[in-house]
Structures are given as C-alpha cells and as structure tokens.
Image (cartoon, rainbow, N blue to C red):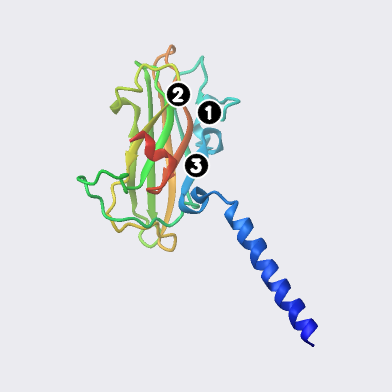
C-alpha cells in the first residue's frame, strides 16, 4: 500500500509540473488580449451588389475596376471577448482603456469612400444602434492614399459596457463607395479590441 501511495503522489506531482510547464509556454498576451478580427473577403455581400464585388489574394475586397457604385458587406461579430477595464481617465498616462475598432482600408481620394460601423441589434425590440464608425472621408491621413492604412474609432459606450449576447446580436457593416472610374476604395480587415488589444497602438 505505501508503494501505491508513493506512486499516486509522484504521478500527481508530475502532472502538475507538466501542466505548469505548458502554461508557462503560452504567451501572456494570449490570455490577456481579447481581439476580434475579420478579413475583408469573409463578409457577406448584399445580393444586389454581387456584380460589383471583387476579392483579392490578400483577403481584401473592392469594387471592380470597370464599375462604379456601392457595395455593402456584413460580418458577424459574435466572438468578441468580455472586456474588463477601468473607467477612462484622460489625465492617465497609461494606455487608453476604451474599446476600439480598427479598419484597414484604402481611400484613393475623389470618388472613393469606405465606411465601417459596429452595429448592435436589440433582440427584444428589434432596435438597431451604432456603437462605432470609421469613415475614411473623416480621416485626412487615409484620403488619397493608394495603399491600405489603419483607421481607428472608440466605441461610443459607457465605461461599464459589456457585450451582451443574451439581448443583442452584433455585426460589422462596411460600405464601399466608388463614384469615379479612377477611384479604388478597398477594405482589407476589421478588428475590435479590448484595452490590451494590439490595435490600441494606432490611437
């Protein structure tokens, strides 16, 4: 019996050691960071806009080069982690704790525009609200750029906001506008980050 007890104790300690070693190999950022990401071509395009829609090898979407018009894409945002954070204090020198949305987009200037919204649908009432908006026309740094750039917006929510999947359905809605044949708007990816998220670097 003592031999069996020693064996059981040794096995238990070995399992604890292995588990601890495996946990130590997981980057700290994995557990601390809540980031929801969608590449451009993973969205559902409205059926009325299918003829204008074009995807690229990088995962980006755009309006076909010979066409003008508007396309709308929607991305289901059901996997956003819970967010725990302190209240926003503008005098604090640390990282801004507010939740943010990043859109990696291209706005080549006149005739091009990209608008990305985070939407919340109330499942009890059917009411639709907008939590954040990135509009390329409101960002001087992105207008007229032939390459993709990241643009950012904070969610317009209270400091104690949590994503509530019991009462709401969340999705990202993206609009690409092209009113000139020489314009080339595009969307490569969208991210929603908690305060520890990587997209915080862009603010």
Q: Distance between the residues labelled 3 and 1?
A: 13 Å
Secondary structure state at the residue bearing disc 1: loop
Question: Of 22 and 114, which appears nearest the observer?
Answer: 22
Q: Distance between the residues labelled 1 and 2?
A: 10 Å
Whether 30 is drawn above or below 149: the answer is below
**Mark 3 or 2, nearer chain start:** 3
Whether 85 is drawn above or below 104: the answer is below
Q: Distance between the residues labelled 3 and 2?
A: 16 Å
Looking at the image, do the residues carrying marks 3 and 1 touch, with CB atoms under 8 Å apart? no
What is the crowding at mark 2: few (fewer than 14 residues within 10 Å), some, or many (at least 20)? Answer: some
Secondary structure state at the residue bearing disc 3: strand
| Residue located 42% across and 34% down the image | 103
Question: Of 5 and 127, which appears nearest the observer?
Answer: 5
Residue 135: x, y in percent?
A: 33, 31
Whether 7 is drawn above or below 60: the answer is below
What is the crowding at mark 3: few (fewer than 14 residues within 10 Å), some, or many (at least 20)? Answer: some
**Which numbered disc covers residue 148?**
2
Residue 162: x, y in percent?
A: 37, 58
Q: Which residue lies furthest to the bottom in this view?
A: 1
**Mark 1 or 2, nearer chain start:** 1
Residue 109: x, y in percent?
A: 36, 16
| Residue located 46% across and 52% down the image | 32
Question: Which residue is disc 3 drawn over?
Answer: 37
Question: Which residue is disc 1 drawn over?
Answer: 60
| Residue located 55% across and 33% down the image | 41
Which quadrant, please, contains the N terminus?
bottom right
Depth check, mark 1 against mark 2: the one in front is: 2
Q: Residue furthest top?
A: 182
Looking at the image, do the residues carrying marks 1 and 2 touch, with CB atoms under 8 Å apart? yes
- Residue 133 location, quadrant: top left
- Total tally of numbered discs in the picture: 3
């Amino acid at each position: 019996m003592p031999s069996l007890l020693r064996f059981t104790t040794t096995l238990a300690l070995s399992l604890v050691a292995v588990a601890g070693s495996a946990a130590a190999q997981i980057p700290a950022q994995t557990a601390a960071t809540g980031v929801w990401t969608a590449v451009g071509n993973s969205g559902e395009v409205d059926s009325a806009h299918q003829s204008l829609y074009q995807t690229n090898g990088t995962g980006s979407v755009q309006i076909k080069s010979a066409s003008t018009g508007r396309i709308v894409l929607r991305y289901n945002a059901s996997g956003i982690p819970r967010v725990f954070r302190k209240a926003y204090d503008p005098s604090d020198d640390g990282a801004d704790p507010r939740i943010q949305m990043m859109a990696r987009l291209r706005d080549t200037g006149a005739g091009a525009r990209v608008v990305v919204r985070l939407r919340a649908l109330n499942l009890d009432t059917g009411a639709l609200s907008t939590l954040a908006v990135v509009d390329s026309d409101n960002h001087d740094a992105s207008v007229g750029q032939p390459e993709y750039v990241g643009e950012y917006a904070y969610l317009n929510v209270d400091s104690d906001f949590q994503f509530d999947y019991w009462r709401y359905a969340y999705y990202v809605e993206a609009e690409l506008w092209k009113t000139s044949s020489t314009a080339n708007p595009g969307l490569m990816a969208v991210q929603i980050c908690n305060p520890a998220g990587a997209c915080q670097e862009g603010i």
